[in-house]
Amino acid sequence: MATATREQFRQALAELASKARASLPDANGRIDAAVKLVLAGDVELLPDGTAQVASSTDPLTRYLVNGTCPCRDFAQAPSHLCRHRLAAIFARRAHATLPALTTIDVATPVETSYDQVAATARVEASAQFIAVCRRSKWSKHVTNSPFLALLAMAGSNAACKISSACSNAFR
């Protein structure tokens, strides 16, 4: 997100939170927690209108919010507005205030496809890996195998054992 757009988003979020605090005074702590979730990027708006919101307490838990929330606080929260539902609402409304992104002209052909870019990146990464391995002491003196060189560079004794076993097998 560009800096100006990010600032607009933060401003919209601050306004939404302020309005929510005024209309839901019993939920102020939940509102603050929801704002933190949105700012941390822990709210993913899904195309079907639902949202995945991360738990504030368990880093491995995500809640699917679709008007309800499976968290423990949902049942007791004022108007069933737990921090996860509030975060989803805030994120959706704040994103709605942003200017529309420029659309791509589909009539203009794209010169490179994703597959071409990904393939090029894989080839370049492989070439860099092999170059690093070939510069290592191991690959110059003991083996031409990038795999064994990598093991040796990682300080693994397995490289010595594999190299010895291979050398003895071909004698």
Image: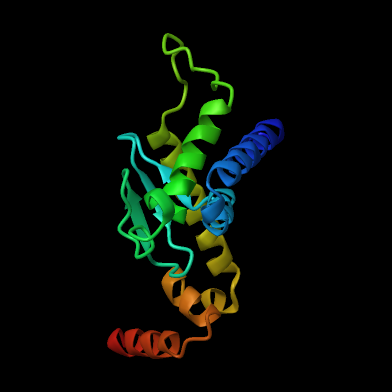
Q: Is residue 155 left or right of residue 76?
A: right
- Way the structure is coloured: rainbow
| Quadrant housing residue 7 | top right
Residue 99 vs 39, above or below: the answer is above
Q: Which is more toward the observer, 152 or 35?
A: 35
Q: In which quadrant is the N terminus drawn? A: top right
Q: Is residue 87 left or right of residue 18?
A: left
Q: In which quadrant is the C terminus drawn? A: bottom left
Q: How many marks?
A: 0
Q: Is residue 60 left or right of residue 170?
A: right
Q: Is residue 74 left or right of residue 102?
A: left
Q: Position of residue 8 (x, y in %)?
A: 67, 32
Residue at the image point whose x is 48% and y is 64% from the top? 56
Residue at the image point whose x is 35% and y is 65% from the top? 72
Q: Position of residue 128 (x, y in %)?
A: 55, 57
Q: Position of residue 86 (x, y in %)?
A: 47, 47
Residue at the image point whose x is 56% and y is 42% from the top? 20
Residue 171 vs 13, above or below: the answer is below
Q: Is residue 145 visible?
A: no
Residue 93 vs 64, above or below: the answer is above
Q: Which is more toward the observer, 154 or 98?
A: 98
Q: Which is more toward the observer, 11 or 123?
A: 11
